[in-house]
Amino acid sequence: MDYVRLGTSGLKVSRIALGTMTYGDPGWRDWVLPEAQGRPFIARALELGINFFDTADMYSLGASEEVLGRALRDYARRDEVVVATKVFHRMGPGPNDAGLSRGHIMSAVQASLKRLGTDYIDLYQIHRFDPETPILETMTALHDLVRMGAVRYIGASSMLAYQFAKMQHVADMHGLTRFVSMQNHYNLVYREEEREMLPLCREDGVGVIPWSPLARGFLAGNRTPGEARTPRARSDRFSEALYRTPDDYAVQTRVAEVAGRRGMTPAQVATAWLLHQPGVTAPIVGASKMPHLEEAVAALAVKLTPEDLSALEELYRPHPVLGL
Ligand SMILES: NC(=O)c1ccc[n+]([C@@H]2O[C@H](COP(=O)([O-])OP(=O)(O)OC[C@H]3O[C@@H](n4cnc5c(N)ncnc54)[C@H](OP(=O)(O)O)[C@@H]3O)[C@@H](O)[C@H]2O)c1
């Protein structure tokens, strides 16, 4: 396993992160694995050298954090792992049960700490931009969490680049903690981030940790026109909304062709492509079967040639903004 700095921070993370949205409560999404089936993935990830785990309060409405927290307590030492979670999405019916207000951030962090069974979160991320809270209120609340020791670093997730730049600017102007990472939507069938967000992150030393590196399985070939080949491909409604155009299918086919030529799987090629992109720190992979994890780690050893890279990239056509 390779370990690299998360952006220009001092935090060292494995170049593959394991996303734990897949583990928790199947009542939340029917492709989610229950705890007993999810724990072995966390144990195997640790064996493979993965030290970086991503969850969110809203995944399985808290159960993903609980599963991750219990597994890490059983299989790892707290200080050898990097635990990342998120705040923003709705966790209850009340007007203050969502968003990035000081009130919700302060309650949400306590709830996440309790579910994770830890007294600090390594990377606390805002899941989305909140247009209904002043940026200074959010940045001050996040800074206070760092000062309190509840949170060690802060990060952000999908938003427009100008919103992210504004938030960092407010932090700078007031001497507050800056975000060290951007968790964004970036894969071979969604590359709009190359326009603004990735150059911004590279210039500012912000680590990039893309979500859904395989486009929720689409790039691994778990779905072809008219045929869904896995339970998640059949029931993941969000995936259908994001990846469905003829251009997307053309890229999917091209990934399979390059993989065939190189004697690899499409998943390895798509993950390796992300690892070749300048500024990308660690793709956050999802795994519902054990070989998924092993193939993600094997992608670290793949060297794509300039011909492979242009074959993978040339069919991409611009997309509307997706996944915000
Ligand atoms: N910040 C955000 O807004 C946001 C949004 C989405 C996700 N995330 C984070 O990103 C993580 C990963 O998301 P994701 O699960 O959508 O990632 P992904 O890696 O794009 O998709 C994972 C799916 O791809 C398929 N797959 C993976 N490896 C494979 C292989 N080697 N061969 C064949 N199929 C393979 C599996 O599909 P099947 O199960 O169908 O076999 C698996 O469930 C989440 O757990 C979460 O932490 C964040």
Image (spheres, grey):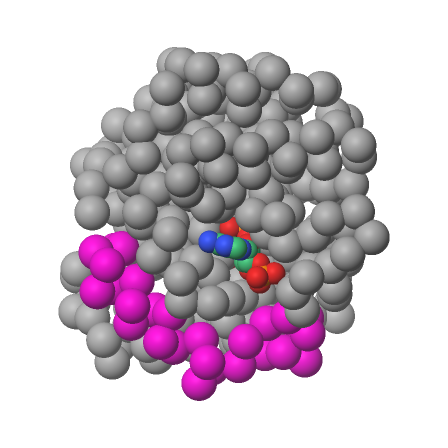
Does 35 sit above or below residue 78? below
Counting every numbered tag in the picture gives 0
Name the quarter where the C terminus is drawn.
Answer: top right
Q: Quadrant of residue 255?
A: top right
Does 74 sit above or below residue 55? below
Does 16 sit above or below residue 164? below
Query: What residue do we see at 43% from left, 58% from top?
Result: 292
Query: What residue do we see at 34% from left, 69% from top?
Result: 42
**Visible in this render: residue 149?**
no
In which of the image's four quarters is ligand 1 placed? Answer: bottom right
| In the displayed structure image, the side of residue 3 where residue 302 appears, left or right | right
Q: Quadrant of residue 191?
A: top right
Query: What residue do we see at 44% from left, 15% from top?
Result: 307
Image location of residue 262, percent across then percent down = 41, 33
* Residue extending farthest bottom: 36
Does 117 sit above or below residue 195? below
Image location of residue 205, percent across then percent down = 33, 22
| In the displayed structure image, the side of residue 270 where residue 16 appears, left or right | left
Residue range of the region highlighted in magenta in the rendering = 25-51
Image location of residue 74, percent across then percent down = 25, 80
300 vs 103, nearest the viewer: 300
Q: Indicate whether residue 196 is drawn in magenta.
A: no
* Residue extending farthest right: 226
310 vs 96, nearest the viewer: 310
Q: Indicate whether residue 43 is drawn in magenta.
A: yes
**Visible in this render: residue 266?**
yes
Image location of residue 116, percent across then percent down = 38, 72
Query: What residue do we see at 50% from left, 31% from top?
Result: 258
